[in-house]
Amino acid sequence: MTKTQISAALRVPPAAPADAADFFAARLAFQADVSDVHASLESGDPGFVLVDSRGDEAWAQGHVPGAVHLPTAEIPERAPDLLDAAVPVIAYCWGPGCDGATRAALALAQLGYHVKEMIGGVEYWIREGFPVEGESGVMRRAADPLTTPVGATHCAC
């Protein structure tokens, strides 16, 4: 690359460090990854309730053990009966190609809940080898070596 050529990745230059710090801190305030959610659930005292915002068929097919089933469309009428407003909520849906968890988190936030979105959704939960509960019980697939270190409990990032 010559001096006059600009890297495709840097056509828009990086933000100022202070702006970048604000942005990344905000992302962490709004999102949690599957590895951290899993570790928190395994601790026995996660400090949050995990909400699966998918529909009935998806829930029956497989969901994170211990999650509360609350489809996004039902949040306004059912959340007050299912969730304690004093306990933070982490919502998930299918995966990165779906914004269902984002819609669910928005609906919960509009009702006054402290909420985060589990990035990666149930897709990355499964790809990282974590257990899924379905109609035939709890199952666990081998971890996808392209998403997590095989045999490790987390990515150590």
Image (cartoon, grey):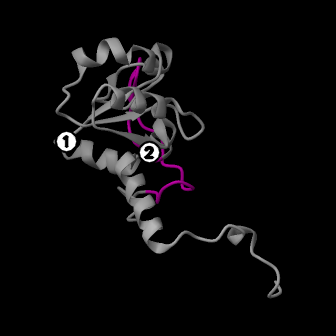
Q: Residue furthest top?
A: 77
- Dot 2: what SS? loop
| Quadrant of the image occupied by residue 88 | top left
Q: Amino acid at mark 2?
A: Gly
Q: Is residue 148 above or below residue 83?
A: below
- Dominant SS of magenta comes to loop
Relative depth, front residue between 85 and 132: 85
Q: Is residue 30 above or below residue 135?
A: below
Q: CA distance from mark 1 to mark 2?
A: 23 Å
Relative depth, front residue between 144 and 99: 99
Q: Quadrant of the N terminus?
A: bottom right
Residues in magenta, as a range:
128-150
Q: Which residue is mark 1?
A: 47
Task: Estimate how packed mark 2 is, as few (under 14), some (14 to 19) or many (20 or more) residues with alpha carbons within 10 Å.
Answer: many
* Left or right of 24 on screen, residue 123: right
Residue lying at 37% horizontally and 32% vertically, measured from the top left: 64
- Dot 1: what SS? loop
Residue lying at 68% horizontally and 67% vertically, measured from the top left: 12
Residue lying at 40% horizontally and 26% vertically, measured from the top left: 107
Q: Sequence order check: which comes first, mark 1 or mark 2?
A: 1
Residue lying at 49% horizontally and 15% vertically, measured from the top left: 57
Picture coordinates of residue 103 (x, y %)? 47, 29
Relative depth, front residue between 37 and 12: 12
The label on residue 129 is 2
